[in-house]
Amino acid sequence: MAFRVAFAGGGTGGHIYPALAIDDAIRAEYDPDHYEPRFFGNRDGLEAQLVTTMPITFVPSAALQRKLSLRTLATVWRNALGVIVALAALREFQPVMVIATGGYVCFPVVVAARILRTLGLLRCGIALLEINVQPGLTNRLLAPIVDEVWTSYDASAPFFRGKAHRTGAPIRASLMRSINPSRARLELGLAPERTTIVAMGGSLGARSVNEAVAALVTRRTLGDDRQVLHVSGERDYAYMEAEERDVGANHVLLVSYLADPANAYAAADVVIARAGASTLAELAATGTPAILVPYPHHSDNHQVSNAAIFADRGAAVVLTDAELDGDRLWWTLDAMLQPERLAEMRAAAASLATSGAGPKIVSRIEFLMPARVVESAEANGSGRE
């Protein structure tokens, strides 16, 4: 019997890459001839570009509304249509596990899975991944109808009434490898010996971070021993290219996007980034000091809670969006880029890493999925070795 897993998530890399990391962990443990994954996402989301290792099914969905308005009706209709599409797709696919990793597309997919299971038309486990300290609205609404919620922080447990299991955040396999910093810089097109500042605005880019970095490299002198890798995001790339046309003697490399940031983390002495949960997990796994700029427009301010953990441990300096500018970045970087402080921050970041998240999640999958599939996998020699 095939070991079929349905992943639901999308919109941003922070919801997609954890699903791909779990997929990596399953492939490391199971015979690929008996493992069949499928991704359920939104046609307009970044998943349409990033998910290349498995088939993808597009499900209509819309962000849930906190207040009643005319827009609420459109949201209800689109998610209801999404449930109908997901019902048909899940019944045809017959996964033994449904894993939702974030994004509003998770709502119709998880609701459809629960309906099919209640009707006896699907035998599967259902789990949410919540790697933020404070969960978003979709996961809070879905928690009562799933079997488990996999978390990164103990502080998340009270939101889920006994369903939380701390697994840590799954990290892509490429980020777990040890990479020589000088070699990583060369492969990125940077000078191997220079102190390196990496600015990453996330998969979609971050306008305020981009503008502050542009001001930093065009109005301040960084010094010949420092360089900047600016990952702007595709949305802002042309704008940043125009803004950074005159960087003077500063050493700056502007790129739109890195599909795999492993070399960027290895190259970095400091990363400037938002405080999304996936980014923080990657910073911890790679032991990278950071300047964190939490996204200010989430209704629950979950990035503020995420960043506070890193700041309290001494792994990051937090700047608000309102105080962020080129001058503030320059002074903050100048204070951070001292050998002793960098060493302390690297150790602090590494202390926040959760080891073995992938195998822990595979173990939870085995616990939740129907016993007949485990027995079949063992009989076929397709289980874990």
Image (tube, grey):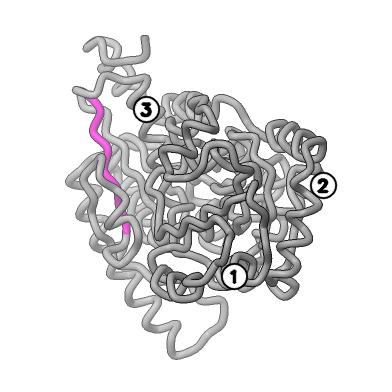
**Residues at marks 3 and 2, CA–CA distance in whole angstroms:** 34 Å
Q: Is residue 37 magenta?
A: yes
Is any part of residue 111 visible from this angle? yes
Residue 113 lies left or right of residue 305; in this view the side is left
Are dots 1 and 3 in contact, CB under 8 Å? no
SS assignment at label 1? helix
Residue 200: percent from left, percent from top: 53, 56
Are dots 2 and 1 in contact, CB under 8 Å? no
To which residue does mark 1 refer? 218
Amino acid type, residue under disc 2 in the picture: Asp
Magenta stretch in the rendered image: 34-41
Mark closest to the chain's N terminus, 1 or 3:
3
**Residues at marks 2 and 1, CA–CA distance in whole angstroms:** 32 Å
**Residues at marks 1 and 3, CA–CA distance in whole angstroms:** 46 Å
Amino acid type, residue under disc 1 in the picture: Thr
Instruction: Give the label on residue 26, or none.
Output: 3
Quarter assignment of residue 354: top right
Binning the other alpha carbons within 10 Å of mark 1 as few (below 14), some (14 to 19) or many (20 upward) gives some
Residue 330: percent from left, percent from top: 73, 62
For discs 1 and 3, the disc positioned in front in the rendered view: 1
Quarter of the figure that contains the N terminus: top left
To which residue does mark 2 refer? 312
Quarter assignment of residue 34: top left
Amino acid type, residue under disc 3 in the picture: Ile
